[in-house]
Amino acid sequence: MSSMLIFGGSGGIGSSIASMAKRLGYSVVIADKKEPSGLEDVRFVATDATVETDVKTALSFTTEKLGVIDVIVNCQGIYLVDKIENTTTQTFDDIINVNLRSIFLVCKNAIPIMKWQNRGYIVNIASMSGIRAKAGQSAYCASKFAVVGLTESLYHELEGTGVRITAVCPSSVDTPQLNSQVSLTKDELDKILQPEDVARVVAELITSNRRVHRTVVPIEIEFYIDKLDKKR
């Protein structure tokens, strides 16, 4: 049975990816600060992915329980919509730590394991805000552009190793984090992505033939919603 380790999988996109993985027959481990609810038959390891010892513990836990790690998904993240003059230095540091440092730590410690296995797939959930910058999202965009750059660099480092890596860049997704930042009408919510939309893209990637390599995969929405760009 294939295995998947999800960092930040206790809710939103991560939970949808966990459910998808279970349907595909994966054994799933969720590494997060809080234990997920509503997910059956998944293992959990308490993890702060910004702390390297926690990341190493989650990786060791998964290899001990499941033998190998076939897929790692980095879903941890902080979303902020605000002008730069309203963004405190501490808030900026928190966003960089959660959105970027954690992914660096996971990749740094997971890649040697996957190289030893001669196989593996790392999926970093980035954002369209890591491809096209938007007003009112300077700190968030900075972190997500960095995730895309990190992923692209590692893509080239991993050539010939049997290990694949992809940055998935969804447009706005209907998650608690988004809803805490902006107030959308029902009609607007119907037009943005749902977590299961992202999970389907991840499923397509991880089930593709090993000869298929994708560096950056954007997921667009059809309609432009100005509220998602900046607070007024």
Image (cartoon, rainbow, N blue to C red):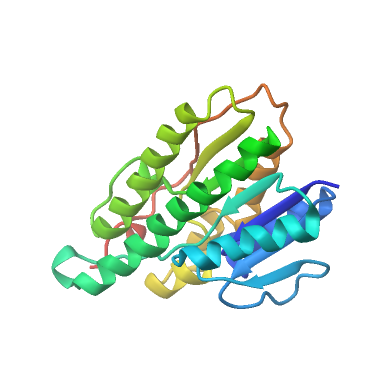
- The answer to whether 135 appears left or right of 8 in the picture is left
Q: Can residue 87 be seen in this view?
A: no
Q: Can residue 78 be seen in this view?
A: yes
In this rendered view, identify the residue nearer to me: 229 or 208: 208
Q: How many labels does the image show?
A: 0
Question: Vertical placement of 158 versus 145: above or below?
Answer: above
The quarter of the displayed image where residue 41 is located: bottom right
Residue drawn at 57 percent across, 60 percent down: 56
Question: Vertical placement of 35 versus 60: above or below?
Answer: below
- The answer to whether 202 appears left or right of 99 in the picture is right
The quarter of the displayed image where residue 28 is located: bottom right
Residue drawn at 65 percent across, 50 percent down: 199
* Name of the residue lying farthest toward the left: 85
- The answer to whether 65 appears left or right of 53 in the picture is right
Which quadrant of the rendered structure holds the C terminus?
bottom left
Residue drawn at 69 percent across, 63 percent down: 61
In this rendered view, identify the residue nearer to me: 58 or 197: 58
Q: Position of residue 66 (x, y in %)?
A: 79, 55
Question: Vertical placement of 224 versus 7: above or below?
Answer: above
Residue drawn at 64 percent across, 44 percent down: 202
Q: Where is residue 79 in the image (x, y as percent from the top left)?
A: 39, 64
Q: Where is residue 31 in the image (x, y as percent from the top left)?
A: 62, 66
Q: Where is residue 179 in the image (x, y as percent from the top left)?
A: 46, 71
